[in-house]
Amino acid sequence: MRIDIISVAPNLLDSPFNHSIVKRAKDRGFVEIVIHDLREYGLGNYKQIDDTQFGGGAGMVMMIEPIANCIRKLQSERTYDEVIYMTPDAKTLNQGTANTLSLKENILILTGHYKGVDQRIRDTFITKEISIGDYVLTGGELAAAVLVDAVVRLIPGVIGDEQSALTDSFQDNLLSPPVYTRPANFEGKKVPEILLSGNFPKIDDWRSDKAYERTAQIRPDLLKDD
């Protein structure tokens, strides 16, 4: 998979993509992540990328020409399965979306700043808009990092135990059940006996029950379609 990201502040993405699972995925050739500095496509001597809003109002808007020029340059080099805009006024990222995107070959991500991008960019180039929550960040770089992390870990081979990713929270619209490790008794707090029994069918049943109970208590909205 190749992921291209258009950013106003590319240095913000150095750390998230150069550590842990994403770095290992890059090193092993499972994913290529390329960051593009939008200011290289800015207008005039000052590489302008934003301007005031038509109609007045506080805040600057990312201009259409630099973004369009950047996207068209990248699209001339390869075909993208999705051109994604990270923005708070969009559908919230969920596990299903991450699963779907993990099967793609080429993804282009545009990160927003200021009051966002000229609407004509969204109307012309964007195929999918994604939010990571009902709040506003100073820019879309951290949101893009969240999306990339959620997607890359699902690429076959990235995680050594692929079954682990398949049993994460939200994969089946349930939160994960409680998990335990050594010691079996810590200051009188004991691991549930069923997990020590070796009876794996009953352990699976226990985990399913606990996942449902936890979901009903914490995120009952996930059970609406049941």
Image (spheres, grey):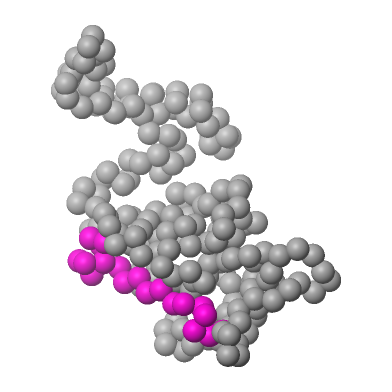
Q: Quadrant of the N terminus?
A: bottom left
Looking at the image, can residue 68 be seen?
no
Q: Residue furthest right?
A: 55
Q: Is residue 99 left or right of residue 20?
A: right
Q: Quadrant of residue 112?
A: bottom right
Residue 174 belongs to the span the image colors magenta = no
The correct choice, above or below, for 144 with respect to 225 in the image is below
Look at 53% across and 32% down and name the residue there: 219
Q: Is residue 220 shown above or below 118?
A: above
Q: Position of residue 80 (x, y in %)?
A: 46, 77
Is residue 38 on the magenta stretch? yes
Left or right: residue 205 versus residue 211 is: left
Who's the residue at 44% across and 77% down the image?
Answer: 36
Quadrant in the rendering for residue 163: top left
| In the depicted structure, whether residue 181 falls above or below residue 23 | above
Q: Nearer the viewer, residue 92 or 45?
A: 45
Q: Tell which of 36 and 21 is nearer to you.
A: 36
Give, as a single range, the part of the protein colored magenta: 23-42
In screen coordinates, is 153 left or right of 75?
Answer: left
Q: In the orientation shown, which residue stands out farthest toward the front? A: 46
Q: Where does residue 140 sit, x and y in percent of width and height?
A: 53, 61
Q: Nearer the viewer, residue 17 or 46?
A: 46
